[in-house]
Image (cartoon, helix red, strand yellow):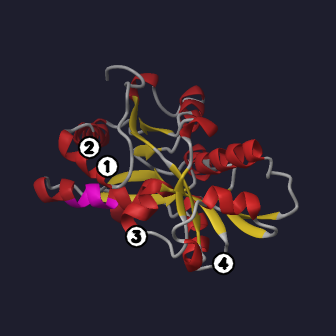
Amino acid sequence: MVCWPTAGTADALRVAVAANFRSTLIALRQTYQQTTDATLKISSGSSGKLTTQIYNGAPFDLFLSADQAHVDLLIANGHGRKQDRFSYARGRLLLAGSDSRTQAQSCMDLLRASQRSRVAIANPKTAPYGQAARAVLEQMGLWTDKKVRRITAENVSQAAQFVYTGNADFGFIAASHVASAGPPAGCLTSVDPTTYPPLTQVALILAKKAARRASAVKFVDFLKSKEAADIISRFGYGLPQTAVGGDR
């Protein structure tokens, strides 16, 4: 569920964030608010659903997407400027299992050998991590295989929840889930990054009013700092290799 900021949060910096990065942003917020008088209000969901919310007038100042495509769609439709986009993290996809007897085994091998498995993935139509999961299953020849029963989650955090609660046998999750919640009960395997589209996470400043824009720029400067980079890395993300966009 995505909640829009309300009138009561008028003085806060309103940030829409992809579900995979929510826990990381909470940690970043804690550090940021210790040294500034700023307040961040966070709304999270799949990148696709947040993009729709922005189209429909949700009053966000900053959007932290899980990919570049949704940011570019917003720019193309007049909801931001190309020079106000930037890459803030590189996501990593993991395959996790819920059966405690499989801790020391390869999730990929177990999924290939399984005769019947429930596999949780984020919705590929709205979530970049879901698109990545679909690419992996297609490469494995399992996307249309009847032995795999896909459980489609609203976003990658919900997919992780299905695995952690045992409601799915396997699930494609973000590395940040393990960093924040610990490993699942069963197997845990890093997915070869060459088997899915790069999860280059891109942000966009949305604020137009001078005061709100100044607040957004100040937080963006913090996101690009070494202090923020250390937190982002601690949550299992890679750091951007190249900048996206241009000077403000």
According to the image, label 2 marks what residue? 229
Neighbor class of circle 3 (other Cα within 10 Å; few <14, some 14-19, many 20+) is few
Front: mark 4 or 2: 4
The secondary element bearing badge 1 is classed as helix
The secondary element bearing badge 2 is classed as helix
x, y percent for residue 205: 39, 37
- Tell whether 54 sits left or right of 183: right
x, y percent for residue 82: 46, 23
Identify the residue at image location x=52%, y=71%: 103
Magenta stretch, residue numbers:
26-30
Comes first in the chain, label 3 or label 1: 3
Q: Nearer the viewer, residue 140 or 81?
A: 140
**Which quadrant of the structure image shows residue 73?**
top right
Comes first in the chain, label 4 or label 2: 4
The quarter of the rendered structure image containing the N terminus is bottom right
According to the image, label 4 marks what residue? 167
- Tell whether 145 sits left or right of 238: right
